[in-house]
Amino acid sequence: MPTPDYSVELDLGEPPPELQEYARRECGEDPNTRLQAIHELREMIYERGECTPQRMDDAFLIRFLRARNFIPRRAHRLMVNYYRFKDEYPELVENVYPLDFRNIGDVNILSVPPYRDQDGRRLMLYRIGCWNTKTIAVDDLLKATIFALEIGVMEIRTQILGGVAMFDLEDIGIQHAWQVTPSVASKIVKLLVSSFPANTHAIHIINHSWVFDKMYNIFKPFLTRDMRSRIFFHGYDVKSLHKHIRPEYLPERYGGVWPDFSYTGWLESLRNNYTVAKEVISCGYKFREEEIGSDVVRRLREEKIKLY
């Protein structure tokens, strides 16, 4: 079966009419009241003073509204959680150079495929068994995940549709289980569920053994009933996975049609994108001058935006 067409470029354009209708129906986004909701959220931020956002523009605030059904009160709570996470774990978000994550991509621990699932949702694929815990710290995996999430929510399509995570646990061992402390489990749950302006609609676990059972027991105290309902365990049965994600939207290793795409390749595709560079710098990320295209560097300097 031939692979469908794909592009590694981010989809930064306006959503098509059918997606706008989905946003109205499923996310409560009414074009007639959109600006009013943004205004209410902005006023709530000023009045309550529970967080100090780096940005207050409409495009930034609407991410939080879309993630919480356009209810300003809930969007505000999400934003507070988002900045509280940054305050609690500065080591994950400060002085981070995204292109340093090439080492994670090179060994295929994490990938962000250039295609979506049948519902138009972004996928994040983890192969935990590829992780050498002696050379890559667990915090580096979290940093790479956070960066991928920040990039993902630049896309309006992802803001509206959310994403899906899949964890392939083939070849995991005790050395991996030791890394999943209660603190790490708490961070992961916060990232995927309560502290980021993107909805994770499902988490699929495949090729899991008894080692994962030990790891999952650490997560359980942090999971609400709703969170648990989004987690699907497939054992070694790819047909079970196919009930949720059709084969034409999966890599060949899971009975699909796609080759593997590395996180490194995805990172490289962002190097010459001025819009992406400007956006991620506004989130606090840094670049070395030689890491990005000369035209991007020139435009950033013209706007007096510092790379690091």
Image (cartoon, grey):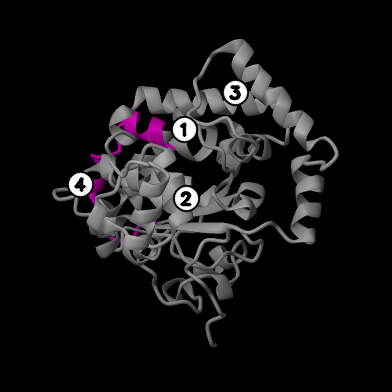
Q: Say whether marks 1 and 3 touch (CB < 8 Å).
A: no
Q: Which residue is mark 4?
A: 175
Where does residue 278 sit, x and y in percent of width and height? 44, 47
SS state under label 3? helix
The image shows residue 105, relative to residue 141, as above or below, that is below
Name the kind of residue labelled 1 in the image.
Answer: Lys
- Magenta stretch contains residue 140: no
SS state under label 2? helix
Where does residue 299 sit, x and y in percent of width and height? 40, 53
The image shows residue 77, relative to residue 62, as above or below, that is above
Where does residue 72 sit, x and y in percent of width and height? 70, 26
For residue 205, say whether it is visible: no
33 left or right of 155? right
**CA distance separating discs 4 and 1:** 23 Å
**Circle nearer the viewer, 3 or 2:** 2
Query: Hey, which quadrant is residue 1 in on the image?
Result: bottom right
SS state under label 1? helix
Q: Say whether marks 3 and 2 touch (CB < 8 Å).
A: no
Name the kind of residue labelled 3 in the image.
Answer: Arg
Give the mark, 3 or 4, whose residue is nearer the N terminus: 3
**Circle nearer the viewer, 4 or 2:** 2
**CA distance separating discs 1 and 3:** 13 Å
Q: Which residue is mark 1?
A: 190
SS state under label 4? helix
**CA distance separating discs 3 and 4:** 36 Å
Residue extent of the magenta highlight: 168-188
Q: Which residue is mark 2?
A: 151
Give the mark, 4 or 1, whose residue is nearer the N terminus: 4
